[in-house]
Image (spheres, rainbow, N blue to C red):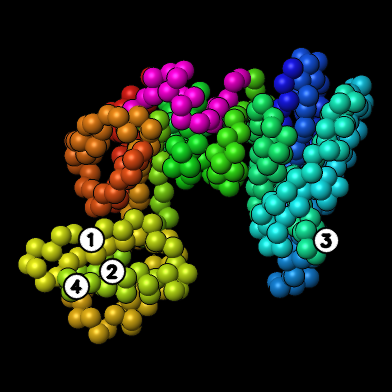
Amino acid sequence: MSLLVQKFGGTSVGGVERITAVANNIKKHKDDGHQLVVVVSAMSGETNRLLGLAGDISDNIPMTDQDVLLSTGEQVTIALLSMALKQIGIDADPYCGWQIPITTDSTHAKARILDIKTDQIQTALESNKVVIVAGFQGICQETNRITTLGRGGSDTTAVALAAALKADECQIFTDVDGVYTTDPRVVSNAKRLDKITFEEMLEMASLGSKVLQIRSVEFAGKYQVPLRVLSSFSPGEGTLICVDDDKEQSVEAPLVSGIAFVKDEAKISLLGVPDKPGVAATVLGIISDANIEVDMIVQNISADGESNDFTFTVHRNDMARAVNLLTEGLSDLSIREIKSDDKIAKVSLVGVGMRSHAGIASTMFKTLADLSINIQLITTSEIKISVLVDEKYMELAVRGLHDAFELDQ
Ligand code: ASP
Ligand code: MG
């Protein structure tokens, strides 16, 4: 017998028929002898509907009130699921976050979980009940007010419960059947991965965030909670997200696990920046003081001993503001030119296998060269190689690389 935390997202509980289907799914696992704690989201569209109501009153709603409102979405689902389970002979206890309690800090709309009391849950499990917990919500330890964990926060509730209960696995049931080598809408023969490491999943965030709230992956990695993504609509093993050694012990780690890409960045280049201490700090200081996040950063070696070129990327929406701030803030530095480009895309190869294999970068660059795709910028980490390319070649690059590394095999 194992203890499983299962989370069902909005689409999986999008109507009464679907809630009944979820109840039947739970019954199957219960009949197999597992102990179950079930976390649910609000029915699909409900959180947005509630936000719309609030927006009709004011566009400046206090977050404390908004959290009271949004937490009702999940409360509806726990009640309906509990009824559906009892209807098929399974005893269940539905709980809101505050009843457990799941205590959080006071950052309304984006609260962090501080503690979960497990006594009540344990007692209910021991009396053979299914425990149902409302996702996405908690209670602020200091103020006693209801809080929410940020959009997609039910994933984090599930992982945090699994960690607190030392569950054998945290299973996220959703509308996709796992994590893919890349976005199947771009590469039709993208393959579902049986396993991926936490690190890889975090690097694949641009793809993965559509599947899981990224915070939940960080949380699961930190507490080493085995996390599985699987479909609530079709049977299958899904994708297990787990620690590195686990993967290396059971299967030979593939060189490349997946290809991530994003189109929402922009590139800013400062040409002819004086080559002296403090310049990079000044440039990036201006950007960080404006709360603009920087992703890739590249500075070349000074050829003439006097000046450098310095390039970095920011979110597209921040590009114009960043360029204005730099133009003003760096006017004393005699920079030759500030260029910017938002017609770019970042394509990344991700894989823990890169640690121990040489030659991946050259295969990547050769593949892009054969497709006549110019690489504008390169950055690497231990398990990732990212390149910037013209956005119109993004899909071509992703498909070419997917083939070159035989990710469909
Ligand atoms: N209902 C919340 C949302 O729509 C939380 C969740 O579904 O995970 O973001
Ligand atoms: Mg979700």
Tell me the crowding category of disc 4: few under 14, some 14 to 19, or many 20 or more residues within 10 angstroms, Cα based: few
Q: In which quarter of the image is the C terminus?
A: top left
**Three-letter amino acid code at disc 4?**
Lys
Magenta span: 236-255
Q: Which residue is drawn at 65% across and 47% down?
A: 152
Q: Name the residue under label 4.
A: 276
Question: What is the x, y in percent for residue 208?
Answer: 51, 40
Question: What is the x, y in percent for residue 404?
Answer: 28, 28
Dot 4 falls on a residue whose secondary structure is: loop
Residues at marks 4 and 2 touching, judged by CB atoms closer than 8 Å: no
Dot 1 falls on a residue whose secondary structure is: strand
Q: Residue at x 20, y 77 (%)?
A: 335
Residues at marks 2 and 1 touching, judged by CB atoms closer than 8 Å: yes
Mark 3 → mark 2, Cα distance in angstroms: 45 Å
Q: Name the residue under label 1.
A: 299
Mark 4 → mark 2, Cα distance in angstroms: 9 Å
**Three-letter amino acid code at disc 2?**
Ala
Residue 79, by quadrant, is top right
Viewer-proximal residue among 114 and 405 = 114
Q: Mark 2 points at which residue?
A: 280
Q: Which of marks 3 and 2 is nearer the N terminus?
A: 3
Q: In which quarter of the image is the N terminus?
A: top right
Mark 2 → mark 1, Cα distance in angstroms: 9 Å
Tell me the crowding category of disc 1: few under 14, some 14 to 19, or many 20 or more residues within 10 angstroms, Cα based: some
Residue 323, by quadrant, is bottom left
Residues at marks 1 and 4 touching, judged by CB atoms closer than 8 Å: no
Q: Mark 3 points at which residue?
A: 144
